[in-house]
Amino acid sequence: MSFQRILRLPQDRIGVLVGRKGEVKGEIERRCGISLFIDSKSGEVVINSKGDVVQSQPFKSVDIVLAIGRGFSPERAFKLLNEDMVLQIVDLRDYVGKSRSSLERVKGRIIGSEGKSRRVIEELTGSYVSILGHTIGVIGKMDGVRLILDAIDMLASGSTHKAVYNMLQKARTKAKMDRWRLWEEQIEPKSE
């Protein structure tokens, strides 16, 4: 069984995908067991599996290429090779429609002054956020990605940054407490 997927990336991200002397492209091909054919003029990227799809990781390679295309560095995109990491891409036009000024306003709220809001959101969720054009890309564990989607929804709806940070902090504290309880239950000897 073979695998083929065709993606279109912004032309200004093709150089990042290829990397210096083809290093990034080669690393994706090697680690995922696929081959990449990149048309730098059109921005079209063709992903083909090499050999058996079961032994390669073509779906991970699609996520890595998409992540790089949505503004992530190759180092962050390669984190998607971890089983528990996922990529989510959100189209901000779903929140603001076609209004250019509304799009810029919501992007500004998510980024924050000098990138502060984005940094805080990343720190509180243990995830990565990239804002490019009309999309927001998120790389992280499923729980962190869900929290970021909630934060985006809140910020796009006009919630204050403080309310968003409080929601994220409460979720982080709850997750820590849940892990602590689980750890405690595993160490306590079972009494009969």
Image (cartoon, grey):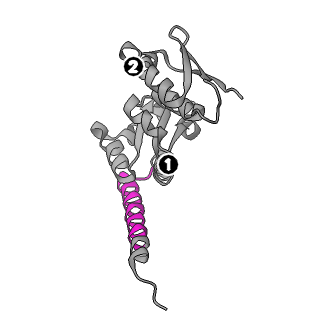
Residue kind at label 2, given as amino acid type: Glu
Which residue is labeled 1 in the image?
Answer: 84
Q: Can the viewer see residue 105?
A: no
User: Tag 2 or tag 1, which sits nearer the N-term?
Assistant: 2
Which percent across, then down, holds residue 177?
39, 70
The answer to whether 192 appears left or right of 109 in the picture is right
Q: Which mark is residue 23?
A: 2
Which percent across, then down, holds residue 169?
36, 60
Residue drawn at (43%, 39%), measured in percent from left and top? 79
- Mark 2 lies on a secondary structure that is helix
Residue density around tag 2, few if under 14, some if 14–19, many if 20 or more, within 10 Å: few
Q: Can the viewer see residue 119?
A: yes
Residue kind at label 1, given as amino acid type: Asp
Up-down: is 89 above or below 180?
above
Residue 124 within the magenta-colored segment of the rendering: no
The answer to whether 44 appears left or right of 138 in the picture is right
Task: Tell me the distance, in whole angstroms, between the alpha carbons under discs 1 and 2.
Answer: 25 Å
Residue drawn at (50%, 48%), measured in percent from left and top? 84
Q: Which residues are magenta?
A: 158-181
Magenta: main secondary structure: helix
Residue 177 within the magenta-colored segment of the rendering: yes
Up-down: is 171 above or below 105?
below
- Mark 1 lies on a secondary structure that is loop
Answer yes or no: do the residues labelled 1 and 2 have beta carbons within 8 Å?
no
Residue density around tag 1, few if under 14, some if 14–19, many if 20 or more, within 10 Å: few
- Residue projecting furthest to the top: 41
